[in-house]
Image (cartoon, grey):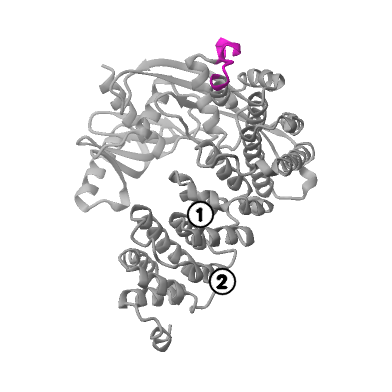
Amino acid sequence: METARLAAFAFMNQRLTALLEDLAAADGLSAAGQARAARRAAWLTEASAEELVEFIAALGHLPLPFAPPADRLLATWLTALVQARRKESERWAATEWTPAIERLYRSMGQASRARAQLLAWLAIGASAAELDTLSQLLIDDPPSEDQDVVQALAPLFQRRRGEVAQLFPRLFAALSHSAIAAPVVDLANYLTREKLVSRHPGAQRVEQLANLLGDVVQSLLRLEEMPAEQGESPQELSRRVARGVALAVSLCDALALIGDAAVAGKLYQALEVRHRRLRTEAAAALARLGDQRGRDALVELAAEPVARLRVLAYAEELGIKDRIDPQHMTPVARAEAELCVWLAEPTQYGLPPVTCELFDQRRQLWPGYDAPVECFLFRFQYVVTLEDGRERSFSNIGIAGPVTHAFVADLGDLPAGDIYAAFAGWQAEHEQIRELDVERLSKSEQLEVERLKRRLIDAGFAEIEPRRVGYFFGDKALVALARRDGAPGVAVADFQEISFFPRRANRPLGPEEVYCIYKGRKLLAAFNR
């Protein structure tokens, strides 16, 4: 940015000027230069309110929209600034931010990931002017990515502030945007549930909300019946379903909170969708409205592991827990449900397994626990339809109880003790437990690698490729790819013992999983003597 243009900003200090120059030059910065520029976020958090207002205004004098490197850099800085305002909300409370923020936001373009932080800044402040600008930007041009929506609106849910009700009913105009529709309804539900409003913000729009639920449900039913006819990629289709289910779930909750039994027909339609989460929320909403069909549907859904935990919570709330089959309330049933819910998360498999059966159960001491805990292993199975129409199934072992997790690598042919060890080693955190790639070792540490490699050679291993060195309470262990009797696999050797895990054809154990087993064996043996 030219010096003459900067002269117009009376409060701009040298450090903030340097930040603007970093943004202007971001495209040409090396990786080290980008990292150095990212660390300068503290310069923003230490600036005065007047300096920040001028900095935001000065950003608008740079070429917009920003190129991706500059946008990423600005997102890093603004994230730090938002975190600072969360801790010191009063520090910048009386400053008039909104004109500069609105102008910058509208100039940054849909592709920007940094502008979500501008919305979060307004949400944290929550003054009348900031909320007015926030609602208008969300209505006109909301973020398009789900993660950005979460970052933008999270501050509105984090403190019990009645002033947030000011956003409604105006914010319902944003329901036309698929990325933000569910969070908008969730916010109205949150205000009602926390008693920050005397009446649900959508009470005067109950018919509109019910009709919207009907439209979303019909769209989901069409997607279930004829997904291939939608002409979308699997990723687009998955996101569309996820957003549709999220909005339908939020609407079911809203209609129950509003309490108008006239909407029961739309909730009955939601019960026809195969998605278990939506069916559970529709049944619970009907039950809250006093509908017997809703109660019956809720009781039946307890048989579905992925819905079970929510069903039990709703049954407790509604006073119908005695109607649930006792087999669905046992510790094993709850543990199965925990694993299935985890597997169905978008960050995991995105849907529950076809089957989930108890593989092993034992009570034992576990890292991080002072007393023995119940540990459950389950074998779960998925069936995948290939592009040519053929079906392929795969299974694995997951854990519930002290931790809920499953590896990508197949643990299915390991003994139960080693499976528990894999999860215990994966979860364990301690300053005396660490591992390093061999490329990062010092010369003296490389000598230790050679000594451990010699142990493997003496034990008959060949084609040894050291990958990692683990440090476990003073002991050193080498993890290496190797062959034994011609069979490839992963070996782990310390100065007392050697273990070897042959490579299997599908989803084999890698160095990381093998070292988890090594750590876990030692931990569980020490705890459960």
**Quarter of image, res 267:** top right
Left-right relation of 258 to 194: right
**Quarter of image, res 455:** top left
The single residue placed furthest to the front in the displayed view is 198
Q: Nearer the viewer, residue 161 or 496?
A: 161
In the rendered image of this protein, does residue 140 appear above or below residue 100? above
The image position of residue 274, as x and y in percent, is 71, 30
**Quarter of image, res 125:** bottom left
In the rendered image of this protein, does residue 83 appear above or below residue 245? below
Name the main secondary structure of what is drawn in magenta.
Answer: helix
The image position of residue 467, as x and y in percent, is 36, 45
Magenta span of residues:
316-328
Query: Which kind of residue does numbered mark 1 sit on?
Result: Ala
Please give the residue where the numbered disc 2 appears in the rendered image: 107
Q: Earlier in the sequence, mark 2 or mark 1?
A: 2
Query: Which kind of residue does numbered mark 2 sit on?
Result: Ser
Please give the residue where the numbered disc 1 appears in the rendered image: 152
